[in-house]
Amino acid sequence: MDRTSLLKTWLPGLALVLLAFLMPTPAHARSEPLYFALEVRRDGRLIAQPKLLGQSGRTLRAERRRPGALAPDYRLVLTPRGEGDGFQLQLDLSLPEGEGHSQLALLHGQERKLQLGRVPGELEVSLLLMKVDSPEFRALMRLTEEKPGTVQSVSSSI
């Protein structure tokens, strides 16, 4: 086999492999940094307010445990994956009193309220999802920054 016939045989295959590496990755397969802001309420009372950074395509786990406690106050597992312009999200929440599970679709910047308890209001989660590299996320972070010389809280007693 001479060099010309070898090139004719291998060149189309090599071109396909290179093309596969150079093509943009579909949105659902891309890994994007994400911000999650949650509020967990049990019987209307706020019990948790985690703010988390994660990544699409990767499971995010968080728990709050008091020092010396054997069991956590709550355990949260979020599994986001990109799908088109939005995200599919699986949420699992465990509390000492029970558990909740939900699967939902969210767009960037969208906030949703989920009822995870047996009756409405028993266990409620509010969830906001944002892409980290977005103007909306940067604006939200600027709103929460402390500015030098400003008073954050004032208390007085007479």
Image: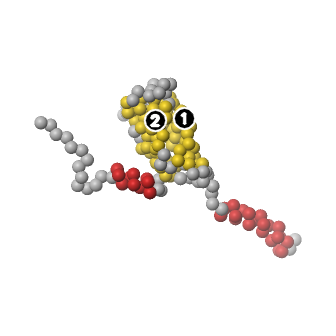
Q: Residue 25 at x, y = what percent?
A: 62, 57
Question: Residue sitting at 70 percent across and 65 percent down?
Answer: 18
Q: Residue 131 at x, y = what percent?
A: 49, 52
Mark 1 vs mark 2: which is more N-terminal? 1
- Quick check: can you spot residue 69? no
Looking at the picture, tell me which residue is in the foreground, 79 or 82: 82
Mark 1 vs mark 2, CA separation in Å: 10 Å
Residue type, label 2: Val
In the rendered image, the residue lying farthest to the right is 1
Mark 1 lies on residue: 102
Secondary structure under tag 2 reads strand
Mark 2 lies on residue: 125
Q: Residue 130 at x, y = what percent?
A: 47, 49
Q: What is the quadrant of the N terminus in the image?
A: bottom right
Secondary structure under tag 1 reads strand
Position above or below: 43 against 132: above
